[in-house]
Protein backbone atom coordinates (compact mmCIF):
# COMPACT_ATOMS: atom_id res chain seq x y z
CA UNK A 1 0.00 0.00 0.00
CA UNK A 2 2.79 2.45 0.93
CA UNK A 3 4.51 1.84 -2.40
CA UNK A 4 1.26 2.51 -4.22
CA UNK A 5 0.83 5.77 -2.39
CA UNK A 6 4.39 6.80 -3.28
CA UNK A 7 3.79 5.99 -6.93
CA UNK A 8 0.73 8.22 -6.89
CA UNK A 9 2.50 11.13 -5.14
CA UNK A 10 5.62 11.24 -7.31
CA UNK A 11 3.92 12.37 -10.55
CA UNK A 12 1.99 15.00 -8.61
CA UNK A 13 5.24 16.39 -7.21
CA UNK A 14 6.81 16.28 -10.63
CA UNK A 15 3.89 18.15 -12.17
CA UNK A 16 4.08 20.69 -9.38
CA UNK A 17 7.76 21.28 -10.10
CA UNK A 18 7.31 21.57 -13.86
CA UNK A 19 4.18 23.74 -13.77
CA UNK A 20 4.85 27.24 -15.10
CA UNK A 21 4.38 29.84 -12.35
CA UNK A 22 1.40 32.14 -12.73
CA UNK A 23 0.61 35.62 -11.46
CA UNK A 24 -0.82 34.37 -8.15
CA UNK A 25 2.42 32.53 -7.36
CA UNK A 26 4.17 35.90 -7.11
CA UNK A 27 1.60 37.56 -4.85
CA UNK A 28 3.74 37.21 -1.66
CA UNK A 29 6.37 39.36 -3.41
CA UNK A 30 4.00 41.77 -5.20
CA UNK A 31 1.36 42.53 -2.55
CA UNK A 32 3.89 44.14 -0.16
CA UNK A 33 4.89 46.56 -2.94
CA UNK A 34 1.29 47.72 -3.25
CA UNK A 35 0.81 47.88 0.52
CA UNK A 36 4.00 49.90 1.02
CA UNK A 37 2.92 52.35 -1.70
CA UNK A 38 -0.41 52.87 0.09
CA UNK A 39 1.44 53.32 3.39
CA UNK A 40 3.64 56.10 2.04
CA UNK A 41 0.62 57.83 0.47
CA UNK A 42 -1.11 57.79 3.86
CA UNK A 43 2.01 59.24 5.48
CA UNK A 44 2.31 62.00 2.90
CA UNK A 45 -1.37 62.98 2.81
CA UNK A 46 -2.41 62.59 6.46
CA UNK A 47 0.84 63.22 8.29
CA UNK A 48 2.97 61.32 10.84
CA UNK A 49 0.03 60.28 13.02
CA UNK A 50 -1.55 58.25 10.20
CA UNK A 51 1.11 55.52 10.13
CA UNK A 52 3.64 54.00 12.55
CA UNK A 53 7.11 55.55 12.73
CA UNK A 54 9.77 54.17 10.43
CA UNK A 55 11.80 52.69 13.31
CA UNK A 56 8.72 50.88 14.62
CA UNK A 57 7.99 49.38 11.21
CA UNK A 58 11.58 48.13 10.94
CA UNK A 59 11.31 46.40 14.33
CA UNK A 60 8.03 44.78 13.22
CA UNK A 61 9.79 43.60 10.07
CA UNK A 62 12.58 42.09 12.14
CA UNK A 63 10.08 40.15 14.27
CA UNK A 64 8.29 38.89 11.14
CA UNK A 65 11.57 37.75 9.58
CA UNK A 66 12.58 35.89 12.74
CA UNK A 67 9.17 34.17 12.91
CA UNK A 68 9.33 33.30 9.20
CA UNK A 69 12.82 31.85 9.67
CA UNK A 70 11.64 29.72 12.59
CA UNK A 71 8.66 28.39 10.60
CA UNK A 72 10.67 27.56 7.49
CA UNK A 73 13.54 25.97 9.42
CA UNK A 74 11.09 23.84 11.42
CA UNK A 75 9.58 22.70 8.14
CA UNK A 76 12.87 20.89 7.37
CA UNK A 77 12.20 18.36 10.14
CA UNK A 78 8.40 18.55 10.23
CA UNK A 79 7.34 19.02 6.61
CA UNK A 80 3.88 20.48 7.04
CA UNK A 81 2.26 22.56 4.34
CA UNK A 82 0.89 24.97 6.93
CA UNK A 83 4.38 25.76 8.27
CA UNK A 84 5.67 26.43 4.78
CA UNK A 85 2.81 28.78 3.93
CA UNK A 86 3.02 30.45 7.34
CA UNK A 87 6.72 31.13 6.82
CA UNK A 88 6.15 32.43 3.31
CA UNK A 89 3.37 34.86 4.20
CA UNK A 90 5.08 36.00 7.41
CA UNK A 91 8.16 36.78 5.33
CA UNK A 92 5.87 38.69 2.96
CA UNK A 93 4.48 40.68 5.90
CA UNK A 94 8.03 41.38 7.05
CA UNK A 95 8.92 42.62 3.57
CA UNK A 96 5.90 44.94 3.68
CA UNK A 97 6.92 46.40 7.06
CA UNK A 98 10.57 46.63 5.99
CA UNK A 99 9.86 48.49 2.75
CA UNK A 100 7.16 50.64 4.37
CA UNK A 101 9.56 51.71 7.11
CA UNK A 102 12.11 52.77 4.53
CA UNK A 103 9.53 54.71 2.48
CA UNK A 104 8.06 56.40 5.56
CA UNK A 105 11.59 57.42 6.53
CA UNK A 106 11.93 58.97 3.06
CA UNK A 107 8.88 61.19 3.56
CA UNK A 108 9.82 62.03 7.16
CA UNK A 109 13.28 63.17 6.13
CA UNK A 110 11.96 65.26 3.25
CA UNK A 111 9.26 66.90 5.39
CA UNK A 112 11.83 67.81 8.03
CA UNK A 113 13.92 69.77 5.53
CA UNK A 114 11.15 71.05 3.28
CA UNK A 115 12.18 68.91 0.30
CA UNK A 116 15.00 71.31 -0.57
CA UNK A 117 18.48 69.92 -1.25
CA UNK A 118 21.59 71.33 0.41
CA UNK A 119 22.80 73.09 -2.72
CA UNK A 120 19.34 74.53 -3.36
CA UNK A 121 19.19 75.92 0.16
CA UNK A 122 22.21 78.01 -0.77
CA UNK A 123 21.15 79.05 -4.26
CA UNK A 124 17.44 79.41 -3.49
CA UNK A 125 16.53 77.24 -6.49
CA UNK A 126 14.07 74.37 -6.51
CA UNK A 127 14.22 71.37 -8.84
CA UNK A 128 11.47 68.85 -9.60
CA UNK A 129 13.76 65.95 -8.65
CA UNK A 130 14.35 67.22 -5.10
CA UNK A 131 11.84 64.57 -4.02
CA UNK A 132 14.28 61.87 -5.09
CA UNK A 133 17.23 63.51 -3.36
CA UNK A 134 15.73 62.51 -0.01
CA UNK A 135 15.73 58.79 -0.73
CA UNK A 136 17.15 57.45 2.56
CA UNK A 137 20.65 56.36 1.55
CA UNK A 138 22.73 58.53 3.86
CA UNK A 139 24.42 56.09 6.24
CA UNK A 140 24.83 52.44 7.16
CA UNK A 141 21.38 52.28 8.79
CA UNK A 142 19.66 53.27 5.56
CA UNK A 143 21.72 50.85 3.50
CA UNK A 144 21.08 48.01 5.96
CA UNK A 145 17.31 48.53 5.84
CA UNK A 146 17.42 48.57 2.03
CA UNK A 147 19.78 45.57 1.96
CA UNK A 148 17.25 43.65 4.05
CA UNK A 149 14.19 44.41 1.92
CA UNK A 150 16.20 43.79 -1.25
CA UNK A 151 17.13 40.34 0.03
CA UNK A 152 13.55 39.69 1.20
CA UNK A 153 12.17 40.65 -2.22
CA UNK A 154 14.67 38.36 -3.97
CA UNK A 155 13.80 35.53 -1.56
CA UNK A 156 10.07 35.88 -2.21
CA UNK A 157 10.59 35.94 -5.97
CA UNK A 158 12.66 32.76 -5.81
CA UNK A 159 10.07 31.18 -3.49
CA UNK A 160 7.25 31.35 -6.04
CA UNK A 161 7.02 27.54 -6.10
CA UNK A 162 6.49 25.19 -3.15
CA UNK A 163 9.69 23.31 -3.98
CA UNK A 164 11.79 26.50 -3.72
CA UNK A 165 10.38 27.88 -0.48
CA UNK A 166 13.23 26.25 1.43
CA UNK A 167 15.35 29.29 0.42
CA UNK A 168 13.83 31.37 3.20
CA UNK A 169 15.02 28.88 5.82
CA UNK A 170 18.57 30.14 5.17
CA UNK A 171 18.01 33.64 3.80
CA UNK A 172 15.54 34.82 6.46
CA UNK A 173 17.99 34.31 9.36
CA UNK A 174 20.62 36.24 7.37
CA UNK A 175 18.13 39.02 6.58
CA UNK A 176 17.20 39.15 10.27
CA UNK A 177 20.86 39.68 11.18
CA UNK A 178 21.20 42.51 8.65
CA UNK A 179 18.09 44.21 10.02
CA UNK A 180 19.23 43.59 13.59
CA UNK A 181 22.40 45.52 12.76
CA UNK A 182 20.20 48.39 11.53
CA UNK A 183 18.27 48.35 14.82
CA UNK A 184 21.55 48.45 16.76
CA UNK A 185 22.77 51.40 14.68
CA UNK A 186 19.63 53.41 15.46
CA UNK A 187 17.07 55.09 13.23
CA UNK A 188 17.83 58.73 14.07
CA UNK A 189 17.72 60.97 11.01
CA UNK A 190 21.06 62.55 10.18
CA UNK A 191 21.92 65.67 8.23
CA UNK A 192 23.04 64.88 4.70
CA UNK A 193 26.75 65.46 4.17
CA UNK A 194 27.70 67.62 1.14
CA UNK A 195 29.59 64.79 -0.54
CA UNK A 196 26.35 62.77 -0.61
CA UNK A 197 24.25 65.58 -2.11
CA UNK A 198 24.03 64.17 -5.61
CA UNK A 199 21.33 62.56 -7.75
CA UNK A 200 23.80 59.68 -8.22
CA UNK A 201 23.42 58.73 -4.55
CA UNK A 202 19.99 57.01 -4.81
CA UNK A 203 21.01 55.36 -8.09
CA UNK A 204 24.34 54.03 -6.86
CA UNK A 205 23.30 52.97 -3.36
CA UNK A 206 19.94 51.65 -4.58
CA UNK A 207 21.68 49.34 -7.02
CA UNK A 208 24.05 48.30 -4.21
CA UNK A 209 21.24 47.36 -1.84
CA UNK A 210 19.38 45.25 -4.41
CA UNK A 211 22.58 43.59 -5.65
CA UNK A 212 23.64 42.77 -2.10
CA UNK A 213 20.19 41.30 -1.47
CA UNK A 214 20.43 38.99 -4.48
CA UNK A 215 23.97 38.02 -3.43
CA UNK A 216 22.60 37.04 -0.01
CA UNK A 217 20.06 34.72 -1.64
CA UNK A 218 22.78 33.14 -3.81
CA UNK A 219 24.81 32.53 -0.64
CA UNK A 220 21.86 30.81 1.02
CA UNK A 221 21.34 28.66 -2.06
CA UNK A 222 25.03 27.72 -2.11
CA UNK A 223 24.89 26.59 1.53
CA UNK A 224 21.79 24.50 0.79
CA UNK A 225 23.53 23.01 -2.26
CA UNK A 226 26.50 21.91 -0.16
CA UNK A 227 24.19 20.28 2.37
CA UNK A 228 22.34 18.47 -0.42
CA UNK A 229 25.65 17.46 -1.99
CA UNK A 230 26.72 15.62 1.14
CA UNK A 231 28.99 18.12 2.88
CA UNK A 232 29.00 17.10 6.52
CA UNK A 233 27.95 19.50 9.29
CA UNK A 234 31.26 18.71 10.96
CA UNK A 235 33.13 20.09 7.94
CA UNK A 236 30.97 23.22 8.11
CA UNK A 237 31.87 23.61 11.78
CA UNK A 238 35.57 23.46 10.97
CA UNK A 239 35.20 25.94 8.10
CA UNK A 240 33.20 28.42 10.21
CA UNK A 241 35.70 28.25 13.07
CA UNK A 242 38.63 28.78 10.71
CA UNK A 243 36.83 31.73 9.10
CA UNK A 244 36.03 33.24 12.50
CA UNK A 245 39.63 33.00 13.68
CA UNK A 246 40.89 34.46 10.39
CA UNK A 247 38.55 37.43 10.70
CA UNK A 248 39.56 38.04 14.30
CA UNK A 249 43.24 37.87 13.39
CA UNK A 250 42.68 40.27 10.47
CA UNK A 251 40.90 42.81 12.68
CA UNK A 252 43.65 42.48 15.27
CA UNK A 253 46.41 43.09 12.73
CA UNK A 254 44.62 46.00 11.04
CA UNK A 255 43.47 47.94 14.08
CA UNK A 256 44.38 46.15 17.26
CA UNK A 257 42.09 44.14 19.51
CA UNK A 258 38.88 46.14 19.61
CA UNK A 259 36.61 44.18 21.92
CA UNK A 260 37.84 40.85 23.20
CA UNK A 261 41.40 40.65 24.52
CA UNK A 262 42.63 37.03 24.37
CA UNK A 263 45.48 37.71 26.81
CA UNK A 264 43.39 39.04 29.69
CA UNK A 265 40.07 37.38 28.73
CA UNK A 266 38.34 40.75 29.04
CA UNK A 267 35.72 42.32 26.81
CA UNK A 268 35.72 46.08 26.42
CA UNK A 269 33.04 48.24 24.80
CA UNK A 270 33.09 51.76 23.47
CA UNK A 271 30.92 54.14 25.54
CA UNK A 272 29.23 57.05 23.82
CA UNK A 273 27.42 60.32 24.44
CA UNK A 274 23.76 60.77 23.51
CA UNK A 275 23.00 63.58 21.06
CA UNK A 276 20.32 64.62 18.59
CA UNK A 277 21.48 62.26 15.86
CA UNK A 278 22.10 59.17 17.97
CA UNK A 279 25.10 58.25 20.09
CA UNK A 280 28.53 59.77 19.50
CA UNK A 281 31.30 57.18 19.74
CA UNK A 282 34.01 58.26 22.22
CA UNK A 283 36.90 56.06 21.14
CA UNK A 284 37.48 54.97 24.74
CA UNK A 285 37.08 51.41 26.02
CA UNK A 286 35.36 50.16 29.16
CA UNK A 287 35.53 46.58 30.43
CA UNK A 288 32.25 44.73 31.00
CA UNK A 289 32.58 42.53 34.10
CA UNK A 290 32.10 38.82 33.43
CA UNK A 291 31.55 39.07 29.67
CA UNK A 292 35.16 38.42 28.65
CA UNK A 293 35.62 35.07 30.45
CA UNK A 294 32.36 33.69 29.06
CA UNK A 295 33.24 34.85 25.54
CA UNK A 296 36.72 33.39 25.84
CA UNK A 297 35.32 30.07 27.03
CA UNK A 298 32.88 29.90 24.10
CA UNK A 299 35.69 30.55 21.62
CA UNK A 300 37.92 27.91 23.23
CA UNK A 301 35.08 25.41 22.99
CA UNK A 302 34.66 26.23 19.30
CA UNK A 303 38.36 25.68 18.67
CA UNK A 304 38.29 22.37 20.57
CA UNK A 305 35.20 21.39 18.57
CA UNK A 306 37.04 22.09 15.31
CA UNK A 307 39.98 19.92 16.43
CA UNK A 308 37.64 17.03 17.28
CA UNK A 309 35.79 17.35 13.98
CA UNK A 310 39.10 17.33 12.08
CA UNK A 311 40.05 14.10 13.81
CA UNK A 312 36.69 12.66 12.80
CA UNK A 313 36.90 13.83 9.18
CA UNK A 314 40.46 12.63 8.56
CA UNK A 315 40.77 9.69 10.98
CA UNK A 316 37.13 8.54 11.04
CA UNK A 317 37.29 8.77 14.82
CA UNK A 318 33.75 8.29 16.13
CA UNK A 319 34.64 9.32 19.68
CA UNK A 320 36.10 12.59 18.38
CA UNK A 321 32.85 13.26 16.53
CA UNK A 322 30.78 12.71 19.67
CA UNK A 323 33.04 14.98 21.71
CA UNK A 324 32.94 17.58 18.95
CA UNK A 325 29.17 17.77 19.10
CA UNK A 326 29.26 18.04 22.89
CA UNK A 327 31.72 20.91 22.61
CA UNK A 328 29.50 22.49 19.93
CA UNK A 329 26.52 22.44 22.28
CA UNK A 330 28.71 23.76 25.10
CA UNK A 331 29.88 26.66 22.94
CA UNK A 332 26.31 27.46 21.95
CA UNK A 333 25.30 27.55 25.63
CA UNK A 334 28.23 29.76 26.67
CA UNK A 335 27.62 32.10 23.73
CA UNK A 336 24.01 32.46 24.88
CA UNK A 337 25.23 33.36 28.38
CA UNK A 338 27.75 35.80 26.89
CA UNK A 339 25.14 37.66 24.85
CA UNK A 340 22.64 37.76 27.71
CA UNK A 341 25.27 39.10 30.11
CA UNK A 342 26.45 41.62 27.51
CA UNK A 343 23.01 43.18 27.12
CA UNK A 344 22.46 43.06 30.87
CA UNK A 345 25.67 45.04 31.48
CA UNK A 346 24.74 47.58 28.82
CA UNK A 347 21.39 48.17 30.51
CA UNK A 348 22.58 48.28 34.12
CA UNK A 349 26.08 49.81 34.25
CA UNK A 350 24.83 53.42 33.92
CA UNK A 351 27.36 56.28 33.51
CA UNK A 352 30.81 54.78 32.93
CA UNK A 353 32.97 57.87 32.53
CA UNK A 354 34.78 57.15 35.80
CA UNK A 355 36.04 53.87 34.27
CA UNK A 356 37.88 55.69 31.48
CA UNK A 357 41.45 56.24 32.69
CA UNK A 358 43.88 58.98 31.76
CA UNK A 359 45.82 56.43 29.72
CA UNK A 360 43.02 56.61 27.12
CA UNK A 361 43.41 60.33 26.37
CA UNK A 362 45.44 59.57 23.24
CA UNK A 363 43.04 57.04 21.72
CA UNK A 364 40.05 59.32 22.42
CA UNK A 365 41.81 62.24 20.78
CA UNK A 366 42.86 60.12 17.83
CA UNK A 367 39.29 58.90 17.36
CA UNK A 368 37.85 62.41 17.51
CA UNK A 369 40.37 63.85 15.06
CA UNK A 370 40.04 60.96 12.61
CA UNK A 371 42.06 61.62 9.46
CA UNK A 372 43.22 64.96 10.89
CA UNK A 373 45.24 63.06 13.52
CA UNK A 374 47.84 62.15 10.89
CA UNK A 375 50.95 64.26 11.39
CA UNK A 376 49.70 65.80 14.65
CA UNK A 377 52.10 65.74 17.62
CA UNK A 378 51.22 63.28 20.36
CA UNK A 379 50.76 66.10 22.88
CA UNK A 380 48.09 67.74 20.73
CA UNK A 381 46.15 64.49 20.30
CA UNK A 382 46.34 63.81 24.05
CA UNK A 383 45.14 67.35 24.76
CA UNK A 384 42.12 66.93 22.48
CA UNK A 385 41.17 63.69 24.20
CA UNK A 386 41.69 65.10 27.70
CA UNK A 387 39.62 68.22 27.01
CA UNK A 388 36.78 66.24 25.45
CA UNK A 389 36.65 63.78 28.36
CA UNK A 390 36.72 66.65 30.85
CA UNK A 391 33.54 68.00 29.27
CA UNK A 392 31.74 64.72 28.58
CA UNK A 393 32.98 62.19 31.12
CA UNK A 394 29.78 62.35 33.16
CA UNK A 395 27.64 61.67 30.08
CA UNK A 396 29.44 58.54 28.86
CA UNK A 397 27.16 55.50 28.80
CA UNK A 398 27.20 52.09 27.15
CA UNK A 399 24.82 51.73 24.23
CA UNK A 400 24.38 49.25 21.40
CA UNK A 401 24.33 52.20 18.98
CA UNK A 402 27.98 53.01 19.71
CA UNK A 403 29.05 49.38 19.13
CA UNK A 404 26.57 48.03 16.54
CA UNK A 405 28.89 45.94 14.38
CA UNK A 406 30.69 44.24 17.27
CA UNK A 407 27.46 43.27 19.01
CA UNK A 408 25.85 42.15 15.75
CA UNK A 409 28.94 40.00 15.12
CA UNK A 410 28.51 38.24 18.48
CA UNK A 411 24.84 37.55 17.72
CA UNK A 412 25.80 36.30 14.24
CA UNK A 413 28.33 33.84 15.66
CA UNK A 414 25.64 32.50 17.98
CA UNK A 415 23.16 32.06 15.09
CA UNK A 416 25.74 30.35 12.87
CA UNK A 417 26.69 27.99 15.71
CA UNK A 418 23.01 27.20 16.24
CA UNK A 419 22.54 26.33 12.57
CA UNK A 420 25.56 24.04 12.52
CA UNK A 421 24.03 22.18 15.45
CA UNK A 422 20.63 22.04 13.74
CA UNK A 423 22.10 20.74 10.48
CA UNK A 424 23.72 17.88 12.41
CA UNK A 425 20.28 16.65 13.54
CA UNK A 426 18.74 14.18 11.08
CA UNK A 427 20.84 15.56 8.25
CA UNK A 428 19.59 12.95 5.81
CA UNK A 429 16.01 14.08 6.43
CA UNK A 430 17.02 17.61 5.44
CA UNK A 431 18.74 16.40 2.28
CA UNK A 432 15.70 14.41 1.21
CA UNK A 433 13.43 17.44 1.64
CA UNK A 434 15.56 19.58 -0.72
CA UNK A 435 15.16 19.77 -4.52
CA UNK A 436 17.62 18.08 -6.84
CA UNK A 437 21.22 19.27 -7.15
CA UNK A 438 20.53 20.34 -10.73
CA UNK A 439 17.67 22.58 -9.60
CA UNK A 440 19.78 24.14 -6.83
CA UNK A 441 22.72 24.66 -9.17
CA UNK A 442 20.43 26.39 -11.68
CA UNK A 443 19.08 28.74 -9.01
CA UNK A 444 22.60 29.66 -7.89
CA UNK A 445 23.57 30.37 -11.49
CA UNK A 446 20.60 32.68 -12.03
CA UNK A 447 21.04 34.64 -8.79
CA UNK A 448 24.80 34.98 -9.25
CA UNK A 449 24.18 36.30 -12.77
CA UNK A 450 21.87 38.99 -11.40
CA UNK A 451 24.31 39.87 -8.59
CA UNK A 452 27.18 40.08 -11.10
CA UNK A 453 25.25 42.49 -13.34
CA UNK A 454 24.12 44.56 -10.34
CA UNK A 455 27.61 44.97 -8.92
CA UNK A 456 28.88 45.91 -12.40
CA UNK A 457 26.30 48.71 -12.53
CA UNK A 458 27.29 49.61 -8.96
CA UNK A 459 30.92 50.06 -10.03
CA UNK A 460 30.02 52.15 -13.07
CA UNK A 461 27.61 54.48 -11.25
CA UNK A 462 30.06 54.75 -8.35
CA UNK A 463 32.82 55.82 -10.74
CA UNK A 464 30.62 58.51 -12.30
CA UNK A 465 29.59 59.79 -8.86
CA UNK A 466 33.22 59.74 -7.68
CA UNK A 467 34.24 61.88 -10.63
CA UNK A 468 31.48 64.35 -9.77
CA UNK A 469 32.39 64.48 -6.05
CA UNK A 470 36.14 63.90 -5.95
CA UNK A 471 37.28 64.83 -9.45
CA UNK A 472 38.36 61.38 -10.62
CA UNK A 473 36.62 58.16 -11.57
CA UNK A 474 38.78 55.76 -9.56
CA UNK A 475 40.82 56.42 -6.42
CA UNK A 476 41.76 52.88 -5.34
CA UNK A 477 39.72 53.59 -2.24
CA UNK A 478 39.27 50.56 0.02
CA UNK A 479 35.52 50.33 -0.62
CA UNK A 480 36.00 50.65 -4.38
CA UNK A 481 38.58 47.88 -4.33
CA UNK A 482 36.35 45.71 -2.12
CA UNK A 483 33.44 46.01 -4.54
CA UNK A 484 35.74 45.28 -7.48
CA UNK A 485 37.12 42.14 -5.84
CA UNK A 486 33.58 40.92 -5.05
CA UNK A 487 32.59 41.51 -8.68
CA UNK A 488 35.67 39.61 -9.87
CA UNK A 489 34.70 36.67 -7.64
CA UNK A 490 31.30 36.48 -9.33
CA UNK A 491 33.02 36.97 -12.70
CA UNK A 492 35.19 33.97 -11.83
CA UNK A 493 32.05 31.95 -11.11
CA UNK A 494 30.52 32.80 -14.48
CA UNK A 495 33.77 32.39 -16.41
CA UNK A 496 34.58 28.95 -15.01
CA UNK A 497 31.02 27.83 -15.61
CA UNK A 498 30.65 29.12 -19.16
CA UNK A 499 34.20 28.66 -20.46
CA UNK A 500 35.27 25.56 -18.53
CA UNK A 501 31.99 23.84 -17.73
CA UNK A 502 32.30 24.08 -13.97
CA UNK A 503 29.18 23.38 -11.94
CA UNK A 504 28.17 21.84 -8.67
CA UNK A 505 30.29 22.10 -5.54
CA UNK A 506 33.16 24.09 -7.07
CA UNK A 507 30.77 26.74 -8.34
CA UNK A 508 28.95 26.82 -4.99
CA UNK A 509 32.23 27.71 -3.29
CA UNK A 510 32.60 30.66 -5.67
CA UNK A 511 29.12 31.89 -4.65
CA UNK A 512 30.09 31.63 -0.97
CA UNK A 513 33.30 33.58 -1.47
CA UNK A 514 31.54 36.25 -3.52
CA UNK A 515 29.01 36.98 -0.78
CA UNK A 516 31.66 37.03 1.94
CA UNK A 517 33.50 39.65 -0.10
CA UNK A 518 30.24 41.59 -0.44
CA UNK A 519 29.84 41.58 3.34
CA UNK A 520 33.44 42.72 3.72
CA UNK A 521 32.73 45.61 1.35
CA UNK A 522 29.48 46.39 3.15
CA UNK A 523 30.89 46.39 6.70
CA UNK A 524 34.58 45.59 6.97
CA UNK A 525 35.84 48.40 4.77
CA UNK A 526 33.88 51.08 6.63
CA UNK A 527 34.98 49.99 10.10
CA UNK A 528 38.47 48.54 9.58
CA UNK A 529 40.15 50.08 6.55
CA UNK A 530 40.42 53.88 6.21
CA UNK A 531 39.12 55.41 3.02
CA UNK A 532 36.97 57.99 1.29
CA UNK A 533 33.77 56.12 2.22
CA UNK A 534 34.17 56.44 6.00
CA UNK A 535 31.25 58.88 6.10
CA UNK A 536 29.05 55.82 5.58
CA UNK A 537 29.64 54.74 9.19
Image: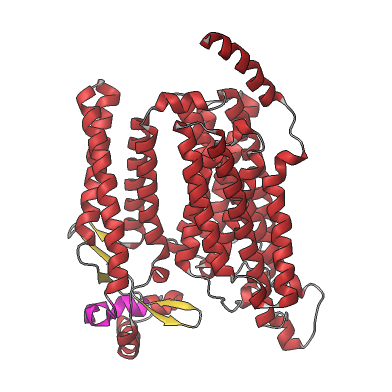
- Name the residue located 48 percent from the left edge and 47 percent from the top edge: 173
Residue closest to the eye, 205 or 170:
170
Q: Is residue 335 above or below residue 81?
A: below
Tell me: 496 left or right of 378.
right
Q: Position of residue 240 (x, y in %)?
A: 36, 41
Is residue 17 among the parts visible in the rendering? yes
Specify the quadrant of the image occupied by residue 379: bottom left
Q: Residue furthest left?
A: 264
Specify the quadrant of the image occupied by residue 292: bottom left
- Name the residue located 26 percent from the left edge and 20 percent from the top edge: 316
Q: Position of residue 528 (x, y in %)?
A: 42, 61
Q: Position of residue 133 (x, y in %)?
A: 71, 72
The segment highlighted magenta reads 350-366
Is residue 517 among the parts visible in the rendering? no
| 364 falls in the magenta region | yes
Q: Is residue 428 above or below residue 118?
A: above
| 39 falls in the magenta region | no
Tell me: 294 left or right of 62.
left
Counting every numbered tag in the picture gives 0
The colour scheme is secondary structure
> What main secondary structure does the magenta stretch of the protein show?
helix
- Name the residue located 39 percent from the left edge and 47 percent from the top edge: 415
Residue closest to the eye, 473 or 438:
438
Residue closest to the eye, 375 or 405:
405
Residue closest to the eye, 491 or 451:
451
Q: Residue furthest right?
A: 128
- Name the residue located 54 percent from the left edge and 30 percent from the top edge: 507
Q: Position of residue 72 (x, y in %)?
A: 51, 40
Amino acid sequence: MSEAIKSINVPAASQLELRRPGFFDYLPALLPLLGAALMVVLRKVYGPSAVPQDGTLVVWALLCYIFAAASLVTNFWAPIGFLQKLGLWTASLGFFCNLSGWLVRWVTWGDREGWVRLTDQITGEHHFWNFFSYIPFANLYDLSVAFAFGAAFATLLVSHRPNTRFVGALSMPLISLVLLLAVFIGSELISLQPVLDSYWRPIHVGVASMSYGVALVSFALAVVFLIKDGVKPEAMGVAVTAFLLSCYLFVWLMGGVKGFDPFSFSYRMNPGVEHSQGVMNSGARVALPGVGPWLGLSLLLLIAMAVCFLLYLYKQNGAARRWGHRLLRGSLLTQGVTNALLFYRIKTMGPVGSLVGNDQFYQVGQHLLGKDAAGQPVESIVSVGANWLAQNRGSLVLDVRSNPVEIAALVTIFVVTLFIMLFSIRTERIRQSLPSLERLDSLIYKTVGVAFAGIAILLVTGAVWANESWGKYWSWDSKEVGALVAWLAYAGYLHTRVAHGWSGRRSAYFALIGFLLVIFTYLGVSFILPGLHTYAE
